[in-house]
Image: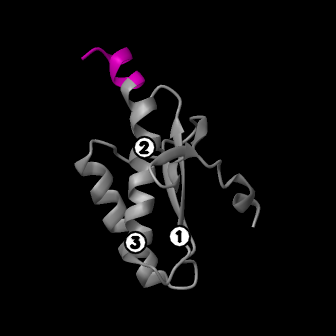
Amino acid sequence: MSRDQELARARTQRPRVLGELEALLRADNPDLNLFISARAHYGEAGLAHLHLYGVEGDRERKSRLMKFATAWLLERGISIDLQEGRDVYDIRPWREAYGDTTQDMGSLDELDEI
C-alpha cells in the first residue's frame, strides 16, 4: 500500500474506529457520560492526541480507561504520538444516533474551552 493510500484509508477509518471505541467505553461504563475527542497531525495516519470527557474526577479510572483505549486503538493499527511543533486537526467520532443509522454527530470542540 502506498503512503497516499495509507493516509486515505486512515482518514476514513479513524472516525469509524473512534466511534466504535466510544460506544464500547460507554457500554462498559454506563455510570459515566463518556465522550471522545481526538486530534491528528496533518500527513500522518495515527492520532496526535486522544481525550476522554466525562471521567475527570477519577484519575485512576481515567488512567485505566486511557490505557485500554490506547491498546485497543493500537490493535487496530492506530497509534497515538503527539509531535512537538506540528499542526493538528480535529477528528470527529462517528456515532450511532438511532437504530442502524450512523452519522456524524459533531465534535466536542466547545468542551476544549472548559
Residue type beneath disc 1:
Leu
Please say whether residue 110 is one of the residues in the magenta stretch.
no
Q: Earlier in the sequence, mark 2 or mark 3?
A: 2
**Type of amino acid under label 3:** Ala
Q: Nearer the viewer, residue 93 or 1?
A: 93
Q: For the magenta stretch, what is the residue range?
A: 1-8
Residue situated in front as seen by the camera: 33 or 74: 33
Residue lying at the far front in this picture: please name it: 99
Q: CA distance from mark 2 to mark 3?
A: 17 Å
How many neighbours does mark 2 have within 10 angstroms: few (below 14), some (14-19), or many (20 or more)?
A: some
Task: Report x, y in % for residue 69.
Answer: 36, 61
Q: Residue at x 40, y 24 (%)?
A: 7
In the rendered structure, which amino acid carries the disc numbered 2?
Answer: Arg
Taking the spot 41% from the left edge, 74% from the top edge, the residue there is: 63
Residue identified by numbered label 3:
27
Q: Mark number for residue 34?
A: 1
In the drawing, does residue 53 fall left or right of residue 112? left
Determine whether 78 is above or below 97 in the image: above
* Labels 3 and 1 touching (C-beta < 8 A): no
**Quadrant location, the N terminus:** top left
Q: Secondary structure at mark 1?
A: loop
Report how far apart the C-alphas of labels 1 and 2 lie in the structure.
17 Å
Q: Secondary structure at mark 2?
A: helix
Between 70 and 82, the one nearer to me in the picture: 70
Q: In the rendered structure, are the residues bearing label 1 and label 2 in contact, judged by CB atoms less than 8 Å apart?
A: no
Residue at the spot of label 2:
16
